[in-house]
Image (cartoon, rainbow, N blue to C red):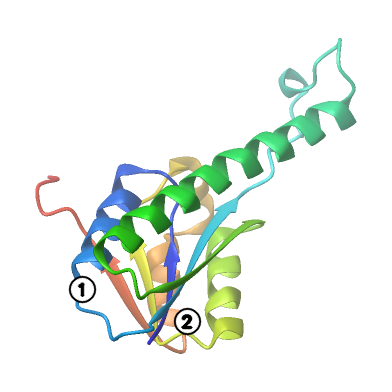
Amino acid sequence: MKIVLAVDGSDFSKVAIKKLAKFPLPQGSEISIINVYEHPAMSTPELISTTVTLDVYYQEFIANAEKIGKKIVSEAGKVLKEKNSSLRITTNVVSGLPKKEILEKAESFDADLIVVGSQGQGAFSRLLLGSVSQYLATHAKCSVMIVKDKDTK
C-alpha cells in the first residue's frame, strides 16, 4: 500500500499521524510524508525590514521553513516506525500551495491513500484558498482519509 501523509505540525496533523500508526498496514507499505510551507505575503511594508534586504529576509524564511518542515516530517516518521518497523518511509518538504502540492505528490507517488488532519495551520490561508482536506477529498484520484480528533469540539 502506498500512502501520502501530509503534516504541518498542528495538533490536527499529530492526530492523523497517531491514527495512521495504529492501522494494521501490509508488510512493506510505503509512506511518503510531506510538509508544505507557503511563502510569506510580501505585499505589506510592515514585513520589509529596513536593516535587512528583502532577499535576505526571503532566504531566512525559506531556511527556517525547511528546517521546521524537516523536523515535522522526521518526527512523524519516527512515530510510524516505532509502531511498524517494516514501513518504507520517505519525507519531503516543499514550497507551494498545500492542496496543490499534496495532490501532485499523491499522483506522482501513485498513492492508494492520502491521510490528512481535519484542519491545519493557517486559518487565513484556509479562508482564502478553501479547506485543504475538502479539496483533496473532491479532487484526488485515490481515497482520502480526513482524521478528526473526536475529543475536539
Q: Secondary structure at mark 1?
A: loop
- Is 95 placed left or right of 17 in the picture? right
Going 60% across and 67% down the picture, which residue do you hit? 101
Classify 12 as above or below 132: above
Check disc 1 and report the residue beneath it: 23
Which x, y percent locates residue 66? 65, 44
Check disc 2 and report the residue beneath it: 139
Classify 121 as above or below 114: above
Mark 1 surroundings: few (<14), some (14-19) or many (≥20) residues within 10 A: few
Going 57% across and 47% down the picture, which residue do you hit? 70
Visible in this render: residue 118? no
Visible in this render: residue 137? yes
Going 52% across and 79% down the picture, which residue do you hit? 106
- Residue 49's image quarter? top right
Which part of the image, by quadrant, shows the N terminus?
Answer: bottom left
Which part of the image, by quadrant, shows the C terminus?
Answer: top left
Amino acid type, residue under disc 2 in the picture: His
Amino acid type, residue under disc 1 in the picture: Phe
Which x, y percent locates residue 61? 71, 34
- Looking at the image, tell me whether mark 2 or mark 1 is earlier in sequence order: 1
Residue nearer the viewer, 126 or 93: 93
